[in-house]
Amino acid sequence: MQVIDHIGIAVIDLEASIEYYRKNFGFEVELREELPSQEVTLAFLKLDNTRLELLAPLEPGSTLSKFLARRGPGLHHICYEVKDIVEALKDFSEKGFKLIDETPRHGANSTLIAFIHPSSTEGVLTELCQYQDRSS
Ligand code: CO
């Protein structure tokens, strides 16, 4: 687990945030996706060595809405790419980490993802992802 796949940033207005990063940093959108099951709409911005994931809530009562109400916009999570997410979750579980997802779920960009609770990870909400269409 040596690669940061992306850094998640919670935003209120996805369009405004995309424009902000395009105008001020020159980051371009690589992918946009709505994940109704997670009540988020998102955009991945391509950087040379990683990506930013801008996340905005789809529903007022969603988990992300509550996060924004509590903390305001800003850093939300870090995602590390793993080769085998089931194995990685088993490993973290055995080490006593508090998992938000006991089993992987479908994320954006044909990935399997799972979150580890920030109480286990020194305050950083941590996402693991595995690409299903490549073996890296
Ligand atoms: Co993410």
Image (spheres, rainbow, N blue to C red):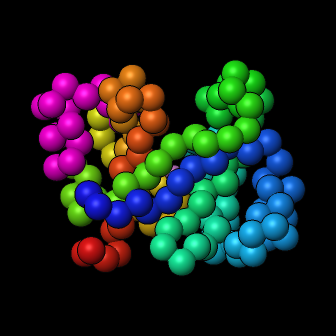
At 84% from the left and 70% from the top, the residue drawn is 23
Res 113 visible:
no
- Residue sitting at the far front: 24
Residue 96: percent from the left, percent from the top?
19, 25
Q: On the rendered structure, is 27 left or right of 115?
A: right
- Position of the N terminus by quadrant: bottom left
Residue at point 17% right, 40% down? Answer: 90
Q: Is residue 98 magenta?
A: yes
| Residue situated in front as seen by the camera: 131 or 18 | 18
- Is residue 89 covered in magenta? yes
Horizontal arrangement in the rendering, residue 40 relative to residue 89 (left or right) = right
Identify which residue, 104 or 18, lies in the foreground. 18
Residue 59 lies, with reference to residue 7, above or below; the image says: above
Tell me residue 128's x, y (percent): 36, 50
On the rendered structure, is 79 left or right of 55? left
Tell me where the magenta segment starts and ends, as one range: 87-101
| 68 or 25: nearer the viewer | 25
Q: Nearer the viewer, residue 3 or 34?
A: 3
- Is residue 54 shown above or below 22? above
| Vertical order, 43 against 27 (above or below) | above
Residue 108 seen in the figure? yes
Q: Could you say where residue 38 lies in the image, as x and y percent from the top left?
A: 58, 41
Q: Quadrant of residue 94?
A: top left
| Point 53% across, 54% down: residue | 7
Q: Quadrant of residue 82?
A: bottom left
Left or right: 58 as drawn, with respect to 39: right
Quarter holding the C terminus is bottom left
Task: Give coordinates of residue 107: x percent, y percent.
Answer: 48, 55
Quarter of image, res 59: top right
- Look at 50% across and 59% down and name the residue there: 6
